[in-house]
């Protein structure tokens, strides 16, 4: 039994904000942002939109494309760092309810920007025991985690959700390999304030995102290269046989550096960071949904999905369409 992607979906906020429309309090320019990140715009959730509402929209679209009925779904897995509730209930339970998956279990998975690729492997493993379809969502409202006076972080992020529906069948291909890694020694390289380590009221509300840009850049380039090489090696492929690399959309310069180290032309790295910015766990499934709409996939294509982020975490899955 093989696990295939049967449907793709996207959920974006209504408001799109270009670099020119950023708050005047930020000391930056469109030229600086584009040259340093590749980002021209991002979507920003309104007060009536959330990780859960965007995830629901993406999941509904993926279900419609897949032909799977909500009551047939066995599990809903939501990768997110910005759930609707600080602790519980899970964002996945909200999505499960709103899509009508009355027979499904549901849980959140937290691996930051690697969350979606982690969730894909978790779903694949679960489906070997229970082959019912699984909805996998990556969703984040990262614009609510940044200090809008800090140009080094606030210009990087956007909000959104992407989803896939996984189905088990006997066709060859599907999810073939996975690579999942972590290094908790990098906890302070990229983190968000708040939590229960120090149980004071002021520490229990999430605060701002903090990032050591240089360390993140060096880590991300190495992680991206490592994952792609490992996936190809595990499947017995050359790098030339990988049709598409669908990476976490963190920064154009990170991906360009990784591509040069791999000797892969950047035309094989699918990029939509210019329009959507860094949507954390949503970047990879949003890219997949866009590629599907654009007719980029052919039967037999090898697609490397790559994530890297806070934790530190990194990983990927290799899919054959």
Image (cartoon, rainbow, N blue to C red):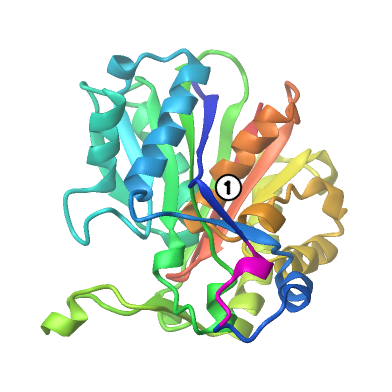
Where's the C terminus, which quadrant? top right
Q: Is residue 123 visible?
A: no
Residue 120 in picture, x, y percent from top left: 46, 40
Image point (21%, 21%), residue name: 103
Q: Left or right: where does residue 208 sit relative to residue 271?
A: left
Q: Residues within 10 Å of mark 1 (few under 14, many from 20)?
A: many
Give the residue pinned by disc 1.
284
Rendered view: 39 above or below 147? above
Disc 1 secondary structure class: helix
Residue 146 in picture, x, y percent from top left: 44, 74
Of residue 266 and residue 271, the one placed in the foreground of this image is 271
Q: Which residues are magenta?
A: 18-24
Q: Is residue 297 visible?
A: yes
Residue 168 in picture, x, y percent from top left: 46, 19
Residue 148 in picture, x, y percent from top left: 48, 78
Total tally of numbered discs in the picture: 1
């Amino acid at each position: 039994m093989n696990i295939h992607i049967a449907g793709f979906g996207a959920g974006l906020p209504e408001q799109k904000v270009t670099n020119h429309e950023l708050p005047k309090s930020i000391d930056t320019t469109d030229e600086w942002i584009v040259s340093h990140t590749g980002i021209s715009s991002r979507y920003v959730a309104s007060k009536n939109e959330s990780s859960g509402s965007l995830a629901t929209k993406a999941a509904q679209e993926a279900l419609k494309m897949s032909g799977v009925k909500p009551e047939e779904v066995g599990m809903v897995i939501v990768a997110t760092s910005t759930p609707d509730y600080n602790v519980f209930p899970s964002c996945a339970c909200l999505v499960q309810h709103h899509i009508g998956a009355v027979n499904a279990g549901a849980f959140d998975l937290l691996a930051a920007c690697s969350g979606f690729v982690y969730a894909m492997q978790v779903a694949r493993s679960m489906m070997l025991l229970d082959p019912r379809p699984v909805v996998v969502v990556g969703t984040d409202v990262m614009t609510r985690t940044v200090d809008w006076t800090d140009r080094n972080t606030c210009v990087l992020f956007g909000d959104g959700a992407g989803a896939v529906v996984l189905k088990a069948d006997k066709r060859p291909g599907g999810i073939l390999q996975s690579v999942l890694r972590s290094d908790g020694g990098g906890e302070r390289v990229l983190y968000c304030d708040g939590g229960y380590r120090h149980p004071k009221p002021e520490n229990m509300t999430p605060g701002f995102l903090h990032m050591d840009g240089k360390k993140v850049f060096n880590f991300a380039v190495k992680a991206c290269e490592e994952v792609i090489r490992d996936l190809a090696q595990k499947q017995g492929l050359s790098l030339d046989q990988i049709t598409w690399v669908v990476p976490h959309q963190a920064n154009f310069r990170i991906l360009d550096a990784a591509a040069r180290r791999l000797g892969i032309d950047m035309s094989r790295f699918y990029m939509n960071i210019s329009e959507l910015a860094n949507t954390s766990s949503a970047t990879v499934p949003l890219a997949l949904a866009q590629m599907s709409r654009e007719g980029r996939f052919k039967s037999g294509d090898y697609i490397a999905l790559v994530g890297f982020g806070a934790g530190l975490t990194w990983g990927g899955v290799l899919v054959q369409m």
